[in-house]
Amino acid sequence: MNSKHPKALPILFLTEMWERFSYYGMRALLVLYAVKFLGFSDRSAGQLYGAYTGLVYLTPILGGWLSDQFLGLRRSILLGGILMGLGHLSLAFEEIEFFFLGLFLLVLGNGFFKPNMSSLVGSLYENNDSLRDSGYTIFYMGINLGGFFGPIICGTLGEKMDWHYGFGAAGIGMGIGVLVFYFGQKLLPSHIGIKPQKKKEFNPRARQLTQVEWNHIKTILVLSFFSIFFWAAFEQAGSSMNLFADRYVDRSIGEWQIPASLFQSVNPVFILLFAPLFAKMWTSLARRNKEPDKPVKFAFGLLLLSAGFFCLVLGARQIAEEGFAGMHFLLLAYLFNTLGELCLSPVGLSMVSELAPTHLTSLMMGIWFLSNAVAHYLGGVFSGMVSEISLRIFFGVFVVMAVCSAVLLLLIRPILNSWMKEKNPVQNV
């Protein structure tokens, strides 16, 4: 890593990598385990998956607030990591009571860990904004490295040896992450993350929003709404697409059959490959004043997503004709979905931080994550219908939904752009 970056960055990189290793390793097994070991129906497994992933995006709102008010960043991260480690280890036991206890601990622990780790990274650069984006890029690499190795190791252990070995491996990974952070936090500046952040005194005029600020908020709300359609489809990766890979895809390479859960590592690989290219592409287009605006990027993301699910429709047609689908259909679906993610996800976060009124940034970011929670729940519920209707119709619904959303977004684009381009007058607050 660049020597100019803070010494603590590698510690946060490794902590996040191991946490994502455990999260994605467990996620790759969850639906398969529920259906094949616990005997859940596809519908029940989908509802379970939707509830779990939805709550994972809800609890950070509470965890972030508790950290700000009482705990501080470091204690919140350690508490969250310990709770998640215990949750993964709880899943390593066969009894159904331990299964639900494990999910509860994971949801609770994630609420303390997820928002505060990202905030801690930003606090390292409070006096060095020029390296902030680079630091977050390095941190993002840790996320995807964990997302790559987790399904491979946990998925292989779970599917080829014993389900509970896979969950146990996820717990060990989280434990390593906690130890890395506990012993490595001495590299953090002494004033960072110990005490809750001090809040500015309440200013009654801060509640008076200008018309420009209201228009910015409306833009955030509209684009957050459209993101629901994207993430509800994208999150099929851990549910219906996982079952599709397990039941219908020819996963043979010679005499070896690839575990279905390993396909969960495809998205992180594509992220690592294409994220730098997208960053360079946007920068190059911006220099020539040709960079697409945010609604267009969102629409591109939705259209690429529709292309990914169209590949699955083609795979479903092959299943109807030959009884199986080639791996290339699934790999192409992950490729297009990842390209869509790169058009939408970072743009959404940037949009919120850019447009939200200063004193409402946390609230607006919470609304963005709330839209993710709604999308994950709806996506999980819909995934439960994968065995109840034709596969071509099932995946075709996402194609139509994504295309219609993109078209509607492009139709209202002039309004959104007029709202975004408005500048708020300087006020003495």
Image (cartoon, rainbow, N blue to C red):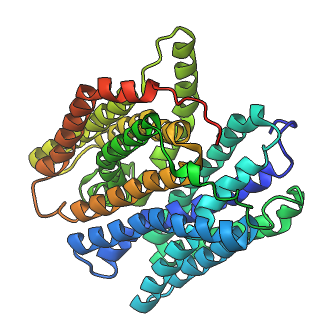
In the image, 293 versus 85, the foreground residue is 293
The foreground one among 116 and 69 is 69
Q: Is residue 109 above or below residue 92?
A: above
Residue 1 as seen in the image, left or right of residue 122: right
Whether residue 131 is situated above or below residue 357 in the rendered picture? above
Q: Quadrant of residue 409?
A: top left
Q: How many marks?
A: 0
Q: Is residue 129 left or right of residue 352?
A: right
Percent x, y of residue 286: 54, 15
Residue at the image point whose x is 84% and y is 45% from the top = 6
* Location of residue 40 in the rendering, given as x and y in whole percent from the top left corner: 26, 78
Q: Is residue 403 left or right of residue 103?
A: left
Q: Which residue sits at x=31%, y=27%?
A: 415
Residue 176 in sight: no
Residue at image location 51% in from the left, 14% down from the top? 285
Percent from the top left, x then y, of residue 108? 53, 75
The percent position of residue 250, horizontal first and vertical second, equals 29, 50
Question: Which one is nearer the viewer's eye here, 66 or 12?
Answer: 66
Quadrant where the C terminus is found in the figure: top right
The residue located at (60%, 51%) in the rendering is 143
Q: Is residue 30 visible?
A: yes
Q: Is residue 231 above or below residue 42?
A: above
- Which image quadrant for residue 114? bottom right
Q: Which quadrant: the N terminus?
A: top right
